[in-house]
Image (tube, rainbow, N blue to C red):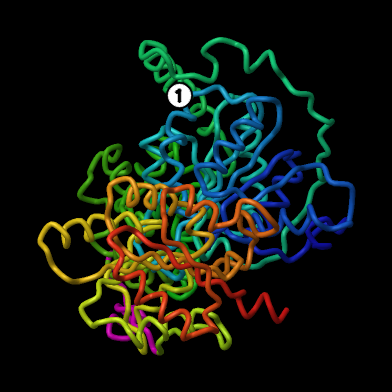
Amino acid sequence: MEKILSKNKKEILLGNEAIVRGALEAGVEYATTYPGTPASEIGDTFYKLQTSNLKPQTFYFEYATNEKVALESAMGANFSGRKTLVSMKHFGLNVASDTFIPLVYTDVLKGMVIVVGDDPSCHSSVQSEQNSRGYSYLAHIPTLEPSDPQECKDFTKLAFEISEKYKIPVLVRITTRVAHQRMPVYFEKISVSPSPSFQLSALKTKGRFSSMPPSHTLEMHSRLLKKISKIQKEIEASEINFLSFPNKKADLGIITSGISYLYVMEAQRILNINLPVFKLGWFYPLPYKKLKNFIKNCKKVLVVEELEPYLEKEIKLISPNSSCVFGKSHLPEVGELTPEYVTLAISKILNIKSPIHYKNLNLTSSSKRTPKFCQGCPYWLTLKALKDIIPKDTIWGGDIGCYMMAYFPPFEMQDYLFSMGSSVGISHGISKNINLNKKKQKVIALIGDSTFFHAGIPGLINCAENKSNPLIIIMDNRITAMTGHQPRPGLYGKPNIEDLVKACGVKYIKVIDPINQEELKNTIKEFLEKKEVSVIIARRPCAFVKNH
């Protein structure tokens, strides 16, 4: 942590660490998150700083129960006078979206920055290959897209400045390759904000932080669009949208943003050419005037971006000849880009020889080995007991956590998996359908302790209230293991899981250490016969935490 607070002019930082440094330089006063890769290190770095004795703390940090709660917590702190940052992964933004979208209509009181980490190629996220840039248009939220750790730091500071100036939250969108690359980052002075006073007057200003009644919502929507128009004028002059080479008349010009910019520069090195490149730091709103001036000097334009062609569609709308704008016709829409893909696209458009050939590219991703639990992981014990005694036609519900590996051999015990907490919610529907059709199959849903707190409780209440009878196994390893061993609610006292399960209306509950295999197996057999939902809490600490 010393390097984050270093008095040196520069230090080598991860992109995520650089975001923290940028927030500190901007004077952040309140930070919160629910841990999710590739954004985990942002919260972890704040947590380590807060719990260290390196310097007097100028901010407050907490791990929230889930991303929606994290966002709402940051909103409450902001509305009452604190400069705030909240970070999450892409699926977390989905969880938070119910509050996130109306938030943008609101005048935030001080600077508020939301960092979202996307994961092209699904390095750590299996449910979908989400492109969160779509939220920029959906919510009309100003969005910055850094390409390296230096920009992570600088763009975070700029995001706070724009947020404060226009009283609007600002989104900083990163990807796995940006979050987890390292480089020397040049520092500026950390800003220590004066102790903020609680601003009751702002909270008591009628209609300031409320979307009621509907006529007021429409007025706020109109004001939001006017803000975006003003911000766009400022973006036209922003130096973070720049040309890497002079924009003279050219056969081909490239427009790009984020990590794709680095792929473009490497592709040019491979081909030994210097094309004009318009690099966008602002993804939304776009500097249309600058882009039009760039396009008119290029016979053809290649738009380089990962996943959906958001930029390409915008560029085609403002181009005098959209047929000369290329993008996904030459680049993949699935998975991460690489310099090789960009090299091939440039060489094909310019009809020049390339040292890269399609046959040398690995166009499909395949696992070279089956992932497994760590040695000593308690999940081995729980899954073994289930595998030993459960009929083959049992329906298995999977959820988000280390136990996702139950999908693979030797267990192969996962028939569905979608999102945090969905194992319980889906198990109810399947169980009801089985009972209505008078079938004998059973449904067993697996869910981790952190995931249960995050999103499993409403589904369990629904099972109890609407009288289905799945068996829910809560895999309680006492930590949020998959994303870096962050603490989870109830770890050091109340609320404990068994009290919450009972409060949800569940009668049949048992806490078992899975090392006791016979007790676990007997309880599984007993609970499978119940005509109501039942819960086994398989409690044994994560081996990594226990041994370290």
Q: Residue 164 in the image: x percent, y percent?
A: 64, 28
* Quadrant location, the C terminus: bottom right
Comparing 298 with 199, the one in front is: 199
Q: Which SS type dominates the magenta stretch?
A: loop
At horizontal 42% and vertical 86% (from top left) the residue drawn is 384
Relative vertical location of residue 137 with respect to residue 540 in this rendering, above or below: above
Relative vertical location of residue 407 with respect to residue 484 in this rendering, above or below: below
Q: Which element type, helix, strand or loop, lies under badge 1?
A: helix
Looking at numbered disc 1 in the image, what kind of residue is underneath it?
Ser
Q: Which residue is mark 1?
A: 229
Q: Residue 17 in the image: x percent, y percent?
A: 68, 59
What's drawn in magenta, residue-wise? 349-368
Q: Residue 134 in the image: x percent, y percent?
A: 36, 44
Q: Is residue 69 magenta?
A: no
At horizontal 41% and vertical 49% (from top left) the residue drawn is 505
- Residue 51, quarter of the rendered image: bottom right
